[in-house]
Each structure stands twice: as structure tokens, then as C-alpha cells.
Amino acid sequence: MKVVMMGLGYIGLPTAALIASKQIKTLGVDVSDKVVQKVNQGEIHIVEPDLAGLVKHVVEQGHLKAQTKPEEADVFLVAVPTPFKGDNEPDLKYVESATKMALPYLKKGDLFIIESTSPVGTTELMADLIYAERPELKGNIHVAYCPERVLPGNVIHELAYNDRVIGGLDSAAAEKAVEFYQHFVKGELHITNARTAEMCKLVENSSRDVNIAFANELSMIADKADIDVWELIQLANKHPRVNILRPGTGVGGHCIAVDPWFIVSGFPEESKMIRTAREINNYKTDWVLEKIKSTALQFELDKGRKPIIACLGLAFKPDIDDLRESPALRVFENLKSNFSEHTILPVEPNVDSHGENSMVLLEDAMQSADIAVKLVAHREFKKLKIENEKILLDFCGK
Ligand SMILES: NC(=O)c1ccc[n+]([C@@H]2O[C@H](COP(=O)([O-])OP(=O)(O)OC[C@H]3O[C@@H](n4cnc5c(N)ncnc54)[C@H](O)[C@@H]3O)[C@@H](O)[C@H]2O)c1
């Protein structure tokens, strides 16, 4: 068996390496020369524990190689980005271009699987695209969808042990895909159709988004009602069937903050709660900004000078270095541009710099700041000591 993986990013590279580790001939295809070169040198271009050793091993053993063009194979996997564009519309241009690149190399009996998070109907669309150019393949190849649900930082383990949902365009495709995933997945493989599998991935992340939106809404209500939201949630969660999540600065990252829009754009009339949850989580970041600005203005009125503000955390969630779609980063950047006469200190223990901003050490920032704004619950901020004169605005709890 030979496998082609289209896209060698956070998902494609670990998946290709895991497949290759089962002594399956694997060709990784990426449009980036840099990525291809790195992989062929047995190196990696992303941060992911345990991945470097695995890639080095499978490249040295000759089971994984990379190039910018596909070749004939038995299985084609697509793990390219699916961002959104314009008015929160899914942008399928990468999935389309990967499908078009693979198209000339497809032959009778091949299995074509999309793993990229995709709006409902994408697998059918890509099959139509293939059959429009290669009508002889209709009924002769197997097309399926199998979403990825790994947690960055634990990808190698989760790729092997998570359950997978596998949706075929027909049952033969689903069964063929199950046979394939059995080579490297130890978790259970659940069979369905492609549309359900596509929606399943979107619904998983929307469920998280809606639940976080409830916590974020509560935090704003509690603030107005002069109630400590952390105590409130802790007490409510004593109910045996209540489990309220933690509020924060908003919701970020490339999954939970993005995927719900794929449902909203496809089903605008029916997805009122999912849309509202997205809006609440985005609004929470504006609310945080307003809190910081009004606290700073009050400080200026009281003390006759502008406060120094330290932003504690820029990543989109605790203990990672990923700044994609990060609400904390949005707060920092907004303060930098709209509060330009103030000194704004970025503190992010997981990165050295971002653009032209060098990070400030936590101890230095805490010494000079008048207002410390806790935007991300990084472990480094757990034992924060606040001196009498200083103000702490904590948006993510102890
Ligand atoms: N990263 C995650 O934690 C995660 C988790 C679950 C699902 N997903 C989904 O998996 C998909 C891939 O995400 P990612 O994080 O790996 O993206 P990524 O940006 O890390 O990597 C994508 C790679 O695809 C390459 N590429 C773009 N167009 C291509 C083409 N036509 N042919 C070949 N390569 C091409 C890019 O150069 C890049 O190296 C997305 O749909 C994402 O939503 C990601």
C-alpha cells in the first residue's frame, strides 16, 4: 500500500509520520518548499512533542518522503487549512487545490479521504470536482470524510488512541476507509455517512463554544450584579447535574472560534444559538477591553498620570505558545493602538516576541505596572502577588 498525504502541517505531518511508522510507504505533499526540504532532512517545522524523533526515524528508514507534487498511490488524504473569509464564510480554496493536485494521479480502486475540518457537503463537492474532470472514475474510486479531533501538544498519542468518525459517500467507501485507519488507529472507528461526519466535527466545537458563551455571559451579568462569578460558578456546580465552564477573555484558536461559523453560514436561519454564542464570545473580548480602559481612566483621574498596564498572557489558551485567533492578543493589540500614550507591557512566558513586540518578564512587568490584566490562566500566573497600590483585573480566574 502507498499513501499520499496532502498538507504537512499540524495534522498532516504527524499523521503521515504515524502511517509511515507502520512501514507503509508514505509520500507527504506540501506546496511549501521549505516544509518539503525540512521533512526530507528528517526535521520538523512545527512545535509538537515527540514528533521530531518520529519524523527523523521514518525518513531515515525510507518510509516517509516529501515533495511538492503527488504521485500515484492507493490512498490519498487531504489535511490542508480551511480558514474563513469575508463575512465568516468557509474558504475551501486549499481543499479544492489539493483535490485538483491529486486528481491526475487517481486511479480505479483508490481511496480519497478528506480530513480537513469542512462545511457540510464538502466531500460531495470534491467528488463532483473529481468526476467532472475524470468521469471514468465515477463509481470506481472510494471517497470518504474523516475529521481530526486531536489536541495540539498531545497529537501523537491522540492520533493513535482517539475514536474516529468515518463517513463515506457510500458504505463501501466507509468500510474501505475503516480498513485503512485500522492500520494505525487503536481507538474505535465509528461508521456514518460523509455529511454526518462533516457535521459531527463542527458540532463538537460548537458545543464547546456554546457552553463557554454561557459562562462568559454569566461573568458579565455577575459583574453588573456585584457578584463574584468564580464563587457563583463553584456553588452552582455543587448541583449534581450542573457543570458550568470557566469564563475568560473570549474564545480563540483556529478550531472553536472558527468551526461554528461553518454551521452558521450553511444554516443561517436554523443556527440562532450557535451564532449568538459566537457573538457573545467575541463580545466578551470587547467587554474586557472596556473594563481595562475604564479602570485606566479612573486611575488617571485619581493619580493625575497615565497608568502602566501589563497584559499577562497573549496565547489563546493556557500553557501554549499559539497566538492564532487569540482574544488576549486582540486585547493587547487594541490597547497598543488605541491607548498609545500609555505604556503597555506584553507578558507571554511561552513566546519571546510577537512582531515588533519583545516580551517583558513577569517579575519586571509586575514591578513597574500600575494595572496588571490577567488575560490567560498560564501556570506562571498562578501565584501572582499584588502589592497594595497595584490593581489586578483578573478575567480568567485563579
Ligand atoms: N491543528 C489542529 O489542532 C487541528 C485539529 C483538528 C482539525 N484541524 C483541521 O485540520 C486541517 C489542517 O490544519 P493544520 O493545523 O494541519 O493546518 P496547517 O496550516 O498547520 O498546515 C496545512 C499545510 O497544508 C499546506 N498546503 C496548503 N495548500 C496545499 C495544497 N494544495 N497541497 C498540499 N499542501 C497544501 C500548507 O503549506 C501547510 O503546510 C484544517 O482543516 C484544520 O481545521 C486542525
Image (cartoon, grey):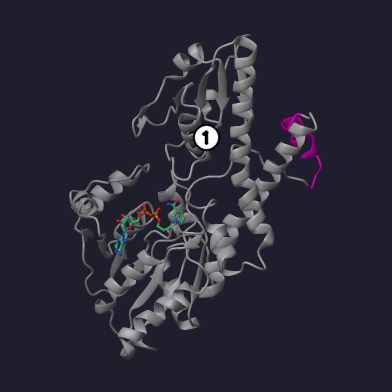
**Residue 188, position as x, y percentages in the image:** 53, 63
Q: Quadrant of the rendered structure where residue 272 is? A: bottom right
Q: Is residue 145 visible?
A: yes
| SS state under label 1 | helix
**Residue 246, position as x, y percentages in the image:** 66, 39
Q: Quadrant of the rendered structure where residue 21 is? A: bottom left
327 w.r.t. 1: above or below: above
The amino acid type found where label 1 is placed reads Val
**Seen in the image, is 49 located left or right of residue 193?**
left
Q: Residues within 10 Å of mark 1 (few under 14, many from 20)?
A: many
Which residue lies at the image location 55% right of the left edge and 31% below the top edge? 375
**Residue 169, position as x, y percentages in the image:** 48, 80
Which residue lies at the image location 30% right of the left edge and 74% below the top edge? 100
Residue pointed to by mark 1:
331
What is the magenta range?
A: 228-241
Which residue lies at the image location 56% right of the left edge and 69% below the top edge? 266
Viewport quadrant of the C terminus = top right
- Is-magenta flag for residue 234? yes
